[in-house]
Image: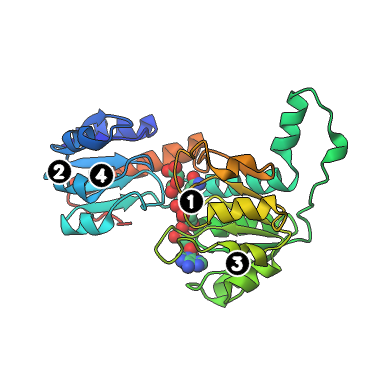
């Protein structure tokens, strides 16, 4: 069977497919007509977040059995079109969860202690010790929006640093939240109002798109916003303005509505907005995990075995 891989995945995943006897073609960053051409005789397509798997792709791919997403979010795949064409969509929901949680914690410290800003000044030869007064996380309140796999791992780590936890997630029980030492709140605004640091861990869905806008940022007054989930959940213009105006103390973002983040994004002009280029899952361990899990899902689909669908 032919497996087309259009975003880089770790070698162990590619090797696993070859060992199973499949032909693997890597064609990174292919798009438009070239993607439609490349996928036309593929039996499986493996992507990360860089490939837009649109309805057009499914229409061009008459031999396709499965699309494997070497990561969690499937918002770059048209799931309805996949269903219409009888193509399985499988993600790798576990392998990068700890990496994403660790990056969230790192970004929280980065913005609360102005680490990138201080680093930049020192590299420029300036000893700006008197200009940075950070926020201690101990005894502060963390508002978690979405207590799924990543949210739970973030909860464990920041709980151990002495933070109080409040959670907004309409799909979990109070008991579930309590297992993580968190208080479940049924209102997003109340969660943000109680939080010194708010961290977003929902998928990007019609329901969550634009969920954190001007009104929500006003509730977070004086706090920090972290988004290592998906761009589009947070209104970036509203956030840049809220940080610039001092409504919110700062923000740390790993994901953006448009990626790569355009040069003219207002987020790049605001000093207290820390940004990373979607690095949440970029650890060696996480990339090996998701690559192998995705390869296994593809092999299972080829063998007619059950595949956990996204
Ligand atoms: P998950 O599906 O395990 O958890 C999502 C949680 O969000 C669930 O508990 C769900 O009930 C909750 N939720 C859904 N709608 C909600 C709403 N309207 N309000 C509040 N909560 C809501 O997902 P996960 O594996 O924890 O991933 C979380 C996010 O992180 C996803 O967007 C994923 O794509 C992203 N992610 C990013 C990186 C990265 O590299 N930055 C890495 C891994 C995951
Ligand atoms: C994910 O959803 O798993 C992340 O966006 C990680 C990625 O693939 O870059």
Residue at image point 27% right, 56% down: 79
Q: Give the spatial CA distance, label 4 vs label 1.
A: 28 Å
Please report contact status of discs 4 and 1: CB closer than 8 Å, yes or no.
no
Q: Give the spatial CA distance, label 1 vs label 2.
A: 28 Å
Q: Which residue is mark 2?
A: 60
User: Element at badge 4?
Assistant: helix
Which label's residue is closer to the chain start, 3 or 4? 3
User: Element at badge 1?
Assistant: loop
User: Element at badge 3?
Assistant: helix
Q: Which of the pair 67/50 is nearer the observer?
A: 50
Question: Left or right: where does residue 245 sit relative to residue 31?
Answer: right
Mark 2 surroundings: few (<14), some (14-19) or many (≥20) residues within 10 A: some
Q: Give the spatial CA distance, label 3 vs label 4.
A: 44 Å
Question: Left or right: where does residue 250 sit relative to residue 90?
Answer: right
Q: Which of the pair 58/71 is nearer the observer?
A: 58
Q: Which residue is mark 3?
A: 215
Q: Give the spatial CA distance, label 3 vs label 2.
A: 43 Å
Q: Which residue is mark 1?
A: 231
Please report contact status of discs 2 and 4: CB closer than 8 Å, yes or no.
no
Let me know if residue 181 appears in the view: no
Mark 1 surroundings: few (<14), some (14-19) or many (≥20) residues within 10 A: many
């Amino acid at each position: 069977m032919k497996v087309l891989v259009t975003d880089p995945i770790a070698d162990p995943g590619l090797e696993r497919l070859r060992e199973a006897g499949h032909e693997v073609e890597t064609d990174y960053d292919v798009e438009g007509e070239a993607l439609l051409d490349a996928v036309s005789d593929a039996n499986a397509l493996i992507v990360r977040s860089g490939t837009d798997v649109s309805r057009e792709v499914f229409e061009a791919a008459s031999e396709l059995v499965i699309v494997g997403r070497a990561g969690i979010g499937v918002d770059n795949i048209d799931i309805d079109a996949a269903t219409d064409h009888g193509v399985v969509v499988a993600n790798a929901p576990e392998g990068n969860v700890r990496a994403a949680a660790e990056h969230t914690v790192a970004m929280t410290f980065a913005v609360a202690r102005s680490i990138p800003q201080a680093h930049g000044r020192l590299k420029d030869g300036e000893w700006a010790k008197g200009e940075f007064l950070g926020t201690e996380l101990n005894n502060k309140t963390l508002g978690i929006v979405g207590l799924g796999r990543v949210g739970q791992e973030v909860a464990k780590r920041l709980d151990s640093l002495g933070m109080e936890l409040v959670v907004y997630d309409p799909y979990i029980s109070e008991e579930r939240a309590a297992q993580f030492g968190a208080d479940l709140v049924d209102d997003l605004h109340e969660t943000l109002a109680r939080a010194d640091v708010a961290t977003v861990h929902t998928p990007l869905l019609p329901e969550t798109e634009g969920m954190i806008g001007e009104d929500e940022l006003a509730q977070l007054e004086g706090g920090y916003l972290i988004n290592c989930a998906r761009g589009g959940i947070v209104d970036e213009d509203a956030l840049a303005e809220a940080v610039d105006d001092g409504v919110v103390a700062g923000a740390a973002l790993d994901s953006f509505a448009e990626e790569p983040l355009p040069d003219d994004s207002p987020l790049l002009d605001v000093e207290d907005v820390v940004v990373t280029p979607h690095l949440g899952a970029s650890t060696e361990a996480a990339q090996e995990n998701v690559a192998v899990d995705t390869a296994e899902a593809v092999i299972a689909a080829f063998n007619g075995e059950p595949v956990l669908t996204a």
